Each structure stands twice: as structure tokens, then as C-alpha cells.
Image (cartoon, rainbow, N blue to C red):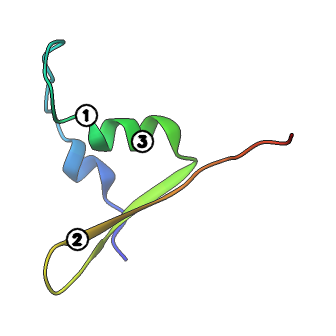
Amino acid sequence: MQELPQLFLGERRLRADAESGYGLHLVEALATSWGITDRVVGKTVWAELFAGHH
């Protein structure tokens, strides 16, 4: 497991009218914890979310 979210978020600036590129920013904003796991082919992004009490 590799927890280097800032490596992927970096200094990238998104335009307000951009239609893509928000995925990891949304994960970072909503998750209590998240990271990236390298695979033989590609990567897996995992996240833990707080569900709250009903």
C-alpha cells in the first residue's frame, strides 16, 4: 500500500468549468482516510467514509 495522495493531487489547478479531474479531490474532501495501492497493472484508490448515526 502506498499512501501518497499529495503525489497525485500535486499542484494541479482545475478550472471552474472543467468537466473532469475532480475525482481525487472529491475523495480527499469526503474521506476520513484514503490511499493508493499499486497493482501489476494500474492502481487502486481506496477510501474510508464516515457514515454517521441514524
- 41 and 35: which is toward the camera: 41
Quote the CA–CA distance across marks 1 and 3.
Answer: 10 Å
Q: Amino acid at mark 1?
A: Tyr
Q: Which residue is mark 2?
A: 43
Q: Residue at x 16, y 87 (%)?
A: 40
Q: Which residue is mark 3?
A: 28
Q: Earlier in the sequence, mark 1 or mark 2?
A: 1
Classify residue 36 by image quadrant.
bottom left
Above or below, 46 against 27 in this view is: below
Q: Earlier in the sequence, mark 1 or mark 3?
A: 1
Left or right side of 52 for 29: left
Mark 3: few/some/many CA within 10 Å (<14, 14-19, 20+)? some
Left or right side of 24 for 15: left
Circles 2 and 3, Cβ within 8 Å, touching? The answer is no
Q: Earlier in the sequence, mark 2 or mark 3?
A: 3
Mark 1: few/some/many CA within 10 Å (<14, 14-19, 20+)? few
- 14 and 53: which is toward the camera: 53
Quote the CA–CA distance across marks 2 and 3.
Answer: 17 Å
SS class, disc 1: loop
Q: Residue at x 32, y 52 (%)?
A: 5
Q: Amino acid at mark 3?
A: Glu
Classify residue 28 by image quadrant.
top left
Residue 27 image position (x, y, % from top left): 41, 44
Left or right side of 30 for 38: left
Residue 18 image position (x, y, % from top left): 13, 21
Q: Between label 1 and label 3, give the one nearer the viewer.
A: 1
Classify residue 13 by image quadrant.
top left
